[in-house]
Amino acid sequence: MKDDGFGVQPLTDAEIEQLDMFLTSESTPKAAMDISMMDGFITALASGPNMMMPSSMLRWIWDADRGEQSPTFASAAESKHIVELIIRYWNNVTDTLNNTLDGYQPLLLQREVDGAPIPVIDEWCVGYYKCIAIDPAAWAPLMAQHPEWFAVIMLYGTEDGWDELKRRQDSLEQHQALADSLAGSVRNIHRYWLEQRRTQIARGEIPGVIGRREPIRHAPKIGRNDPCPCGSGRKYKRCHGAVESVQAAGNQGNSDDWTAVEHATIEAERYPVHSQLSQRVERGEAAVEIEIYKDGKGGWLLEVVDEFGNSTVWDDSFPTDSAALAEALNAIDAEGIVSLVGSIPDGTTRH
């Protein structure tokens, strides 16, 4: 049964308008995407050869030119709300492509010509092509094999294409036909990469991650499985360790959200729902446990624990458990498993 909670709940028309108003406001950099460009960008991310972490995705939404500038939020509450809207939008596009592909339609803006609504294609195509431009080597084989699937995207989403449009002087009927063809192209591209991912998984491979973020590492003085020093008899991670996690989350957000943050975090600590993708990974003499569990808000948390109880926790949640696993394995392959192993306690030898 499909989850009807935070993760895949579609945005209402009012929420889409609110998000677009923020993206085009003075609070965001001049190069921020509008709602249609963001839809194209997210659609390409959800369909493409490699995955991208939420933190990396947001950088490009805020600043489509360089992925460097950030918006100015009026408050922590506004920041939390806008980011939640974007993540919900991303999850809904992904859910639509994976579960109801035939019903997918791009979000195109409109303008009036002689009283008739005409779709604006270029914003959406620029967003889709931005994803391709960030990861060109991975997209190149399919673009060479099926250039017809990318023809409209390249025509309306690149400077060379705009020059071609000026030369062609298409009629409004031709323009409408090209707009109508976008959904079919998206479906073809998504089916191709979906099959490629299935083949990768069958071979035991994990899709790559674009713009991998650096994990925030915590090596607690008290091991997560050690008895809590308060004398309760419970493990530290189930006692004062849980309280510290709640406090850290509360300090990062708005004080008005304290009750909800506290409840969600304590419930996650008491009754963690672990993913079946959680696993032990060994490299040479070192080993770590990859623990992936629900955060109670539609996302997945990632924690890597070494055999001495040292914990590495990723600051951001992930939209799926497979994305969390890909991030952990990518970190191990890129930095080495020793980067996730903390200090060895005095008098202790490796198992």
Image (cartoon, rainbow, N blue to C red):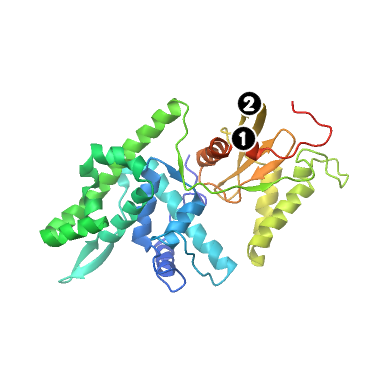
Q: Is residue 58 left or right of residue 251?
A: left
Label 1: element kind: helix
Q: CA distance from mark 2 to mark 1?
A: 9 Å
Spot occupied by residue 232 in the image (x, y as percentages of width and height): 86, 44
Name the residue that disc number 2 marks: 284
> Which label sits on residue 337?
1
Q: In percent of the image, x 35 and y 32: which residue is there?
A: 195
Please tell me which residue lies in front, 12 or 42. Answer: 42
Q: Residue furthest right?
A: 231
Tell me which numbered mark, 2 or 1, is placed earlier along the sequence. 2
Label 2: element kind: loop
Q: Is residue 177 left or right of residue 35?
A: left
The number of numbered discs placed on residues in the rendered structure image is 2
Spot occupied by residue 30 in the image (x, y as percentages of width and height): 40, 69
User: Where 199 sits versus 340, above or below?
Assistant: above
Q: In percent of the image, x 37 and y 64: which residue is there?
A: 34
| Residue type highlighted by circle 2 | Gly
Please tell me which residue lies in front, 218 or 198. Answer: 218
User: Where 148 sits versus 112, above or below?
Assistant: above
Residue 203 in view, yes or no = yes
The answer to whether marks 2 and 1 mark residues whose Cβ atoms lie closer than 8 Å is yes
